[in-house]
Image (tube, coloured by chain):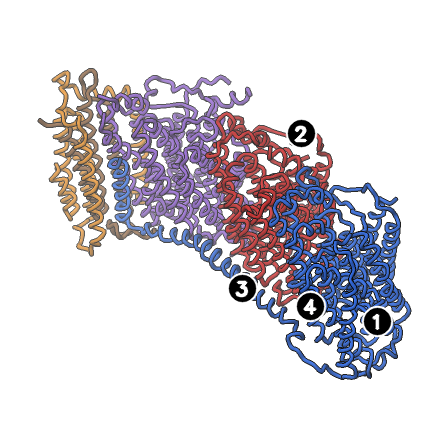
Chain colours: A purple, B orange, C blue, D brown, E red
Amino acid sequence: MPAVYSPLTLEIIVLVLGLFLLFAESFSKGADKRWIPNLSIVVLAMVFVFSFFTSGDAGVDLTKAFYSADAQALFFKRLALLTTIVVLVMSIEYRGVLAKFIPGSTDGAGLGEFFCLPIFTCAGLMFMASAVDFLLIFVALELVTISFYVLVAYMRRQSSSLEAGVKYLILGALSTGFLVYGITWIFGMTGETNLKQIAQALPAVLAEGGRLHGSETGLLFGIMLVLIGLGFKVAAAPFQIWVPDVYQGAPTPVTAFLSVGSKAAGFIVLVRVVQSFVHLPHVGEKVVAIIAVLAGLSLLYGNLAAMPQENLKRMLAYSSIGHAGYLLVAVACLNSNLTTFGSATTAVAFYLAGYLLMTLLSFLVMIVVANHSRGDDILHFNGLGKRSPFLAFAMLIAMLSLAGIPFTAGFIGKFLVFAAAVQQHHYWLVGIGIITVAAGFYYYLRVVAAMYWQEPNDDTRISLSPLARLTIGGLTAAIIFFGIFPQPILNMLHTPAPAVAHSMSH
Amino acid sequence: TLVFGASVVINRNPVASALSLVVSFLGLAALFVGLDAFFIAVIQVLVYAGAVMVLFLFIIMLLDLRAEERRKINKAAWAGGALVALAFFLQVIAVVSGYRPGQSPFPALSTNNLNDAHHVGMALFTHHNLPFQVIGVLILVATIGVVILSKRELK
Amino acid sequence: MDTHLPWFILLCPLVSAALIHLLLRRSPGLSETLSVAACGFALLASIGIWFSPIPTTQIEVPWLDFRPTLYVPIGFSIDALSKVMLLVVTGVGTLVHFYSLVYMEHDDAKPRYFGNLSLFMFSMLGIVLANNFAMMFIFWELVGVSSYLLIGHWFQRDSAAAAANKAFLVNRIGDFGFMLGILMIWSATGSVIFNEIGANMAPLTANPTFLTVAVLLVFCGAVGKSAQLPLHVWLPDAMEGPTPVSALIHAATMVAAGVFMLARVFFLIDATPTAQAVIAWVGILTALLAALMATQQDDIKRILAYSTLSQLGYMVMAVGVAAPGAAMFHLFTHAFFKALLFLGAGAIIYALHHEQNIWRMGGLSGRMRTTFLTFTAGFLALIGCPPFSGFFSKDAILLAAYHVNTPIFILGLITAFLTAFYMTRLFVVVFLGSSRTEEAKHGHDGPLRMTAPLIILAVLSLITGWFGSEGYFVHAFPARHAEHTIIVPILAVLVFVLGAGAGWILYSGKAKDPILIPWFRDKFYFDELYAALVAGTQDLLAGLSSWFDKWILDGMIVRGLAGITWGTGFMLRFFQYGNLQGYSFLFGAGIVALIYFAVFTK
Amino acid sequence: MVTLNDYLLVSGLLFSLGFTGVLLRRNILTIFMCLEMMLSASNLSLVAFSRFNIGADGLPNYNAQVLVFFIITVAAAEVAVGLAIIVALFRSRQTTHVEDISTLKF
Amino acid sequence: MLHLLILLPLFAALFVLVGAPARKTALGTAAAMFLISLFTLFSYDKAGPQFQFISSSVIAAAWDLKYLLAADGLSLVMLLLTGLVTLAAVWVTPKIEKRENFFYACVLFIAAGVAGAFASQDLFFFYAFHELALIPTFLLIGIWGSGERHTAAWKITIYLALGSFILLIGLVALYYALPAELRTFDMIKLQALAGSNVIPAAAQVTPYLLLLTGFGILVSLFPFHTWAPSAYASAPTPAAMLHAGVLKKFGLYGLLRLAVPLLPEAARQYVWLLLILLVGNIIYVGLATLAQRKLDLMLGYSSVMHMGYIFLGIASLNLVGLSGASMLMFAHGLSIAALFAVAGQLRHRSTSLSFDSLGGLAKSLPFLSVAFGLAAFASLGLPGFANFASEMMVFFGAWKNGPASLSFSGMQIATICALWGVVISAVYMLRAYRAVFFGEPHRDTIAATDPKFTLRIPVLLLLGALLLTGFFPETLLGYIRPSMEALLK
């Protein structure tokens, strides 16, 4: 099929879908609003498929300055779409809990919006994936953030949800403040907001006789502030402090969305920002060093603090900090020019893809199990292997993938990350990584141990809706598939769209 | 501006803080004017000093907040916070004063009759079309959010 | 045919052992027949080899083939040495097999016994036939294990199990040295095959100290197997095994393997006088001390065991004084008369329902005629009474010592005296006088199948000395000090007469031991010393390392690190103390620190 | 003569003040106001830079001013949502004091 | 053929999970694996190229990542070991009371992982297949183990995860130590670089030390051994057999395959370190073994101790030593598996495996007593068993590395220690044998009876293989030697 559509079409379809649903929802009657997510899932899936047939051309000239349509951007758009689809599936499973904590006359009160907001968020994420200008980055980021404020605090009858919302709000706004201030400074130093132009302008600005010659402090100051803002989004230590509380308090699908979508988008932006500065002589080294420090801190904090957790959701929150650490390790390797095995961008992308699959899978299983066991502590998983072998197996795969066992996507991600790190001789980071991987094995396997070693607390079998079963099965299969055949993902990253036609010709 | 900014922080009563903030924002608008950014100055007054702050005051009144009662203040935490803020402030000063080109005065503009709103508008609607539309979505989302979070009974 | 005979000899007992162990564990009759037959065939083949010329070519099978670095074949060296040893081993072996038929008649694990016996024959013949160090070591070890199995035959008895363990372990210690010696010699000459080493001695002789150490290490093997000081402690304990085993293994063949090995590698020993001196002194000290210990033992088998030790010391000493021919001669004669003595003792024990204390015997000469007569032959041979075989072989050894080293010669004479003394004591107490227990009064000869081997051995004990010293052994090992003196035989006869006389006078008619020397009786406290040594070093170290492993390495370091990691995590989560303000503080602190490091440090 | 650095300094000071407020105040509403102040402070810098980095046509860099416009818009939206959340929280907990909202921890 | 070796147990495991009759499927699969491994061994053309049965499918072209199966003599011997031990392990498994299907699936997963690790000639799959066994082990010990099974399961899993992760880093470091144009995961290509010194000596150090640590942990190299005894003591019999017998050999196999051909300089430079550690294995762990009062723990320690010998062979870096090490891997695998099999049988007949509560079993359990005796003798290096031949080679090989004089080299001193270790192992093995089988029977175990005939076959199989290769080591050496020559080129 000839590829003639601009990738921007994707966002547009998503937005239109969101708007349509919003209106349709307000005019529809009936308490059962499952048709909304069902419809969105179908449409988003179509968009997902459609994304393989778009061109790498950003289309209209006007958008070019802000919008990049390279393979990476497309790839992250797909991630966003996929995440949203799964989150919607989760939301359907979760609606019972949700309804309890939303004031409303009917069972389905407020659910329509809950299903619509992720679609807008998704659009925001997709914009972020393409954003190459601080302007668009900022706007898209805020779109995502603000919808997350709402989503996190959605269960307003539950004070923990609200508390999480407030914490996220204040700290999020704080980080936005720093991000903006950082953008200001970078703009001030370079006179540009577009990343490409910044990268072009910088050598001249820094050169002998240039405006910044001998005083990179301002530039560094700006970069650091931006890093802080982004570090907040991706949950990197020491700006991770909000993560556990917010993850625990938020409705579980939102938590999943936060930990995957927000993080993925944050990372693509981070990668783009860092890439613009990393090749500068002195500044680049500093940036790399600082990111490496952040990586080390995140690894240690996330993984170690996850060990004593009893609540699975909270444990996954800490672990998500840890995963941010692994990703940052790869980001810290961006100054390598390697394009084959060991390339840092590939590592980030692959890791995120794997992380997406496994995190979503574990949250999905968690929602199902928590619905039945009335709690999401690890001990609620006791004996799951007996109660529902299918769910237990899926969770097993998710946990193994998170821990990084071969033949799962998570392993290839870690493999690539550490390959990049070794290649860049970040041996101290690797050393920390060794400790934290071991710690990770401990806390992930605790879930496995609970599922298989322990006797179940109650013997009721867990029933599953067909959609959830399909999604869980699909995610599990995908984790294993990409753990053995990474090539499809690599194709998406390396070849310009349309990847399908390309790989078929081989 | 700074004085009132400080008063925002110092005042124990949220209402006083809010009013200080209004004044501070007005001062800020004046500074914008000084920088030949008239459009921004206007927006600042309208949106910030006007709408936003009214909203704040409204909420304060709604929640019927009185001055923070004197709670046992954790001295160490307070000192720590102050220290961090001070350190950050010093860093800002150091960065700013280290910025040599900034010591020179502002370059002159090519025209004295700056059609400021026009330029911003042009930029906004042509070059920055895409982000502008995204902003629209953002506001929509915010609206939905406010509705959902505040409505007493959802249908 | 000739080239296949060695294979036949070797494989006969192997096949027998394998079949018995694998298939015939429930059929005692068949297994004993098979075992005896295998041994008989091996004897016939050995005789065949004895009468055939030394073959020039051999069939070799490579066992490890890393030529040119390392080549270990399974190959045979057929020469005068191995020919005679073959005869001894198969000859005594066959007799012992026959004897066992009766002795073990009522044992309920007969197949196991005969299987192990065949295994032992296999291993022993392997040592004899080996043409290289590695192969010898292989069979050396196998001999160790088969003796372990045989000693531990009655494993329900704790003492038997302990003795078996001890025998194996002490041998292992010797083998430690043996293997090390082999490695050293190999590293110098590049070969483990005797012929090749012999042809390529230059690298060894060029470095005398090295050679000495290597030879002494090899000698360690012999010390273990032939129960020389200080590794002699296992042999007396090994008497826990069935008596035919004691006769076969611990008198005639296995313990002689050490001496055989020394004779086999004499071309190495020959090149290092220091090692020779050490060997000689170890030998004579063993001979002397063992003889002293033997004078105070009460258990008939133990007395014989110490006497074996003593005689082995003699042989080793003979090697040390450069007279391997004499050593082999004594080995040859000793094999027969000691087997005879053991089997005789076995007959007595059998007759007295497993009574082994000599003081609970007495007056058996009348009731156990055949046993008495044959035992007397062995007794006379051992104490060196002409014309019994022991006289000639002992004479040959003393002669060699006389020429080389006077102190050793004197000690040798003393040992001969003691030998005569304690054997007379044994003889007098057991056979003469009056019966001291009920069982002793009713003892009687065993059936013919049991006495026949005794008779044959008695004849052999008498005659084997006659054609030895002048003939075969001197021919095989041309001794350096060939000239005879009349002094040596005279002195030898003198000490024998003195010793026997002293024993006779002291013990005739006594009902209990008139003298008591604790040091001799308690074997110079070697066992106690070793027990203390083992407890003080090995067990202590074992305990220590186990403790260290459990508490320090695993407990403190591994678990500690895991615990520290966990604990750090536990502490870290207290950052998350819920207060928003605290969060913004940490956030801010992070910002400040980050900016500080990024912007304000070089 | 007023230099760029003067503006930057004022802006930085304001930003720091806002930050101080966030760190020290106990009332969520006040904290939220301080956050708005920080955003405004950035705006000041941004405008100053925009005025300073004039383009080839001799006009201020309007990219930055557009960004300021966006920031103000976003801030407004944020305030709306934020206040909604705070109100909801107040309804359920009857407090806007930060120390009272610390049930989620460790 | 090699595909079948991996896929068969994998699919069997899945079938069993889905509900196929567990024991029958598992046993059939294991038997098939054994036959296939035997068949491949015989159809390997010793005169042909080093690697045969090559099959390769591209996984990621950009990285030169392939699913590459091939076998040389060494792999084949290890695969044979896998087949033998798997068959025996499945066979001796007693009736599983709870979740039988799951149990057998775990065992089959381990088997698949091991077979894959030995058959893959691609770094990625080589590593990945080994890890496949980690989680089944965790589950096996945790669910069906005995004693302090949870502690043991945690310890082995975390420790091994740590080890394999270090190993992974080492592999990556090795990959990047190669010049850019030669970088590949293809182990056939990598081995072809043996002797070419493409990696400068200085650059060899980091990968070597990482590999040594990583593999060392997997092999329970002193002082990283503490996971092993308790895990083996607690593991259900087939898990212990497979793990101690086969899986643990993976690390040694890896060192042979990677470190020897590619990092010889570093290996030489750090031989002192390896020697100290392996002497730690032999002497220190040997002594610790002596102090054990429980049969299962003692066997666990002894399996750790014997790793020292294999390391000594590897350290020697010459043909004799390496061949010895390879063969010892095979031999030790069989003997320790046989020992654990017997210990497992004893566990079902006695309340505890503590020496105090056992004794005199030779009377009531003649078969087990003989089997244990043979396996014990094999493991303490008695001639006739493959262990002896291999240890001889190891000693000769290691000794060769020093001068023929009295100034012993470190390697020779280590050899002396190793020789003394043989004495130590004799002490503890015989002590154990005596305590368990000799003496008066303990009253708890008086009624015990031998396993029935069919259950004896697996143990006999292991012992038979040991004896066969012990009598005729050249049968195996014919396969191993060419591989080693290629590695040492």
Name the residue that disc number 2 marks: E49
Give amino acid for label 4: Leu
Q: Crowding at label 3, few (<14), some or many (≥20) Cα neighbours within 10 Å?
A: some
Residue shown at 45% from the left, 37% from the top: A418
The residues tagged by marks 4 and 1 sit, at their Cα atoms, a distance apart of 24 Å
Please tell me whether mark 4 sits on a helix, a strand or a loop. Answer: helix
Question: Mark 2 packing: few (<14 Cα in 10 Å), some, or many (20+)?
Answer: few
Q: Secondary structure at mark 3?
A: helix
To the question of a shared chain for discs 2 and 1, the answer is no
Q: In front: mark 2 or mark 4?
A: 4
Q: Nearer the viewer, residue E132 or C203?
A: C203
Lower sequence index among marks 4 and 1: 4
Q: Quadrant of the N terminus of chain D?
A: top left
Is the same chain shared between marks 4 and 1?
Answer: yes
* Discs 2 and 4 share one subunit: no
Q: CA distance from mark 3 to mark 4?
A: 33 Å
Q: Chain of mark 4?
A: C
Q: Is residue A97 above or below residue A479?
A: below
Which residue bears the numbered disc 3?
C540
Q: Which residue is mark 1?
A: C375
| Among the 4 quarters of the image, the one containing residue C595 | top left
- Numbered badge on residue C288: 4
